[in-house]
Amino acid sequence: MRKIIVIQALLFLCASAFCQEVVSTGSITASTSSTTASTGSTGTESSDTAEQLSFTEEPMEEVAPDDAFIDLLKTAVIPEIHPLDTIEETPPSHIAISFVSDEALAKPQVEAFRKMYLSPKWSALLRTYLESAMEYRLYVRKAVQDAKMPEMLEYLPVVESNYKTNAKSSSGAIGMWQFMANSVWPFLTLNDFVDERLDPWKSTEAALKKLTDNYNFFNDWLLAIGAYNCGVGAMNRAIKRAGGVKDFWYLAEGGFLSKQTAEYVPKLIAIADLAINSQYYGIDIPSHDEEFELLENEKNGNFDYITVKKAYSINQLAQEMRLDSATLKRLNPSYTMGMTHPSKASEIRLPLGMKQSAQDALANMTPVEFPIKYTVVAGDSLWSISRKYKTTVSAICELNGIKENAILKIGKILYIPSK
């Protein structure tokens, strides 16, 4: 409102000044006319000039300024013009990581891995690892939270396998959590038909149980995590060599641990720090908090299950259920032969809401029988074996999880289906 009054006042002043100028001009013109008349100028020229200046014959009355209004203008304050205010965003703060001290976060070993993963190449890879396994990652997060374990364990599969469920190391460790064959008991099942190291859900439960056992033994999470890599025995021997000091950093920096284990924990801390504080570090690693809040179906391990006690083909079951066979195989990756165990109880994981459909399908299926366990010898081929036992190459391949053009190694065990 005050701005409008000021503008009106300025317009009034401009108008007053214009009128005064016109009045002054008219007065001068009138004087000139009078002077011309007094010198005796006559004729057409004088008449034309008079007509041109005839509006001055009745000079306008000079408007006296309004002193009160002028005083008001003197006191009026014209507001300063500023650019539009911009809201300054508060920079994201660093979020503390449970069971990891500020001193540990500042360790040179941690900083080295953090710097590596902040590079464009490695930050892109880290994002790829975490995003490609998002459904398993959210399940791990929930399992870790439910067990009240350190939140950084969500990122341990990155260190172990880059979150790849079928990863296999040069030393023979398999799966997302990289269990060795000699370390599966009593956590997982491993036999000719089943390898639960390949099951991301069961192996997660097993890994967290193993880590809990480690913590109960050492009463220190960093030692427990380090022992997951090198083994409880190796960690205990390192502690004894260090004079009984139960401190991971002391053991790592003092050379009491192998290089692999000494780098194992710092790498995990760096990855967890970057993922949890991605906004702070300015890297693109979505946390999927909204998805985690919803946690629907297989994202949080909510499935239907059905138990069988004979060998049933996973592929055939999917066909009977009118379900994509790749989906059912993905939910049951531990059945390495493509079927359940022929004599032990086996649990088949199903999409939520499909238990009845599976039961109906199984009622129409005949379980696979295993009359023969055959050992490959020199000169064998799939065709010759199928002819010998009066079956088909495709039946042998499906039962054993191999391709029809596979080259058989001497000593390989093949299961021959019934006729």
Image (spheres, grey):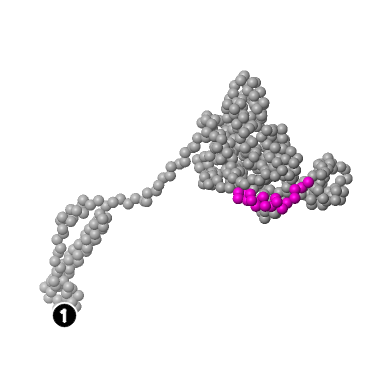
The residue located at (67%, 47%) in the rendering is 330
Q: Which residue is situated farthest in the left direction here?
A: 38
Q: Split into 4 quadrants, where in the image is the N terminus?
A: bottom left
Residue bearing mark 1: 43
The residue located at (19%, 75%) in the rendering is 52
Q: Is residue 20 above or below residue 171?
A: below
Q: Along the horizontal axis of the image, is 93 left or right of 139?
A: left
Q: Along the horizontal axis of the image, is 223 left or right of 18?
A: right
Q: Check if residue 99 falls in the magenta segment.
A: no
- Report the front residue among 6 and 47: 6
- Report the front residue among 391 and 228: 391
Is any part of residue 189 visible from this angle? Answer: yes
- Numbered range of the magenta stretch: 351-369
x, y percent for residue 118: 57, 40
Q: Secondary structure at mark 1?
A: loop
Is any part of residue 130 visible from this angle? Answer: no
x, y percent for residue 295: 55, 46
x, y percent for residue 280: 50, 40
Which quarter of the figure has residue 300? top right
Disc 1 residue crowd, few under 14, some 14–19, many 20+, Cα 10 Å: few
The residue located at (14%, 61%) in the rendering is 64
x, y percent for residue 373: 82, 42
Which quarter of the figure has residue 167? top right
Q: Is residue 94 above or below residue 79?
A: above
